[in-house]
Amino acid sequence: MEWDGPLERWCEETCGICPAQTLAPGRFHVVARPATELAFNRQLGWRATPSGTPVCVHPYRVGMPPGAYASAGERVPDLANLHVFEPPEEALVLPDSLDDLSAWVVAHLRSTDPDRIFRTVARLERAAGERFAPGEVVKILRRVLSVEMARV
């Protein structure tokens, strides 16, 4: 199947700097996790490989397994039956970049028993507030919780 734009749910469920915000499935790569060489490229408007290929670094948010879909022509999975991927262990480590904070929050929420969500959110807010400006942390928590709480 060919898509001419992003999946509707991606606008809420992916990072603001993810190419899935504006590109169709198959028009970007998906890799297992963030890396220094896959930083946000302001000229392009999303994360990219050093050669400029758009890349999503959170497969558990975009709902696609890692693959070189854009340049290697790997087949895009059946997106009608997307499943929720378990976040990898490294996704649970507090990031150094504010750009990756929302994915960190999502990873924790998706790894938490529903009965412990509120305790988890409080713990995440404290931990993130030690590294990032508290106002920025609250903005990210609000945005993530508005989407993720519907999953609980």
Image: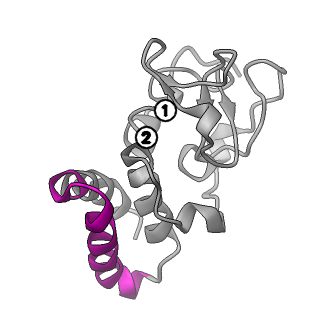
Q: What residue appears at the point 47 percent right and 83 percent down from the top-left corner?
A: 113
- The amino acid sitting under disc 2 is Cys
Res 56 seen here: no
Which quadrant would the N terminus be assigned to in this image? top right
Q: Which residues are magenta?
A: 114-137
Instruction: Kindly indicate the quadrant of the structure image that contains residue 11.
Output: top left
52 and 8: which one is in front?
52
Q: Are marks 2 and 1 in contact (CB under 8 Å)?
A: yes
How crowded is the residue under tag 2: few (<14 C-alpha within 10 Å), some, or many (20+)?
many
39 and 12: which one is in front?
39
Residue 48 image point, x, y percent: 59, 24
Q: What residue appears at the point 61 percent right and 22 percent down from the top-left corner?
A: 54
- The amino acid sitting under disc 1 is Cys
Relative to 141, say whether 143 is above or below: above
Residue 87 image point, x, y percent: 61, 62
Left or right, residue 40 beside residue 137: right
Label 1 sits on a secondary structure element that is loop
Left or right, residue 49 beside residue 109: right
Majority secondary structure of magenta residues = helix
Residue 101 image point, x, y percent: 40, 53
| Residue at mark 1 | 18
Residue 78 image point, x, y percent: 72, 39
Q: What residue appears at the point 44 percent right and 39 percent down from the top-left corner?
A: 9
Q: Which mark is residue 15?
A: 2
Which quadrant would the C terminus be assigned to in this image? bottom left
Label 2 sits on a secondary structure element that is loop
How crowded is the residue under tag 1: few (<14 C-alpha within 10 Å), some, or many (20+)?
many
Q: Is residue 27 magenta?
A: no
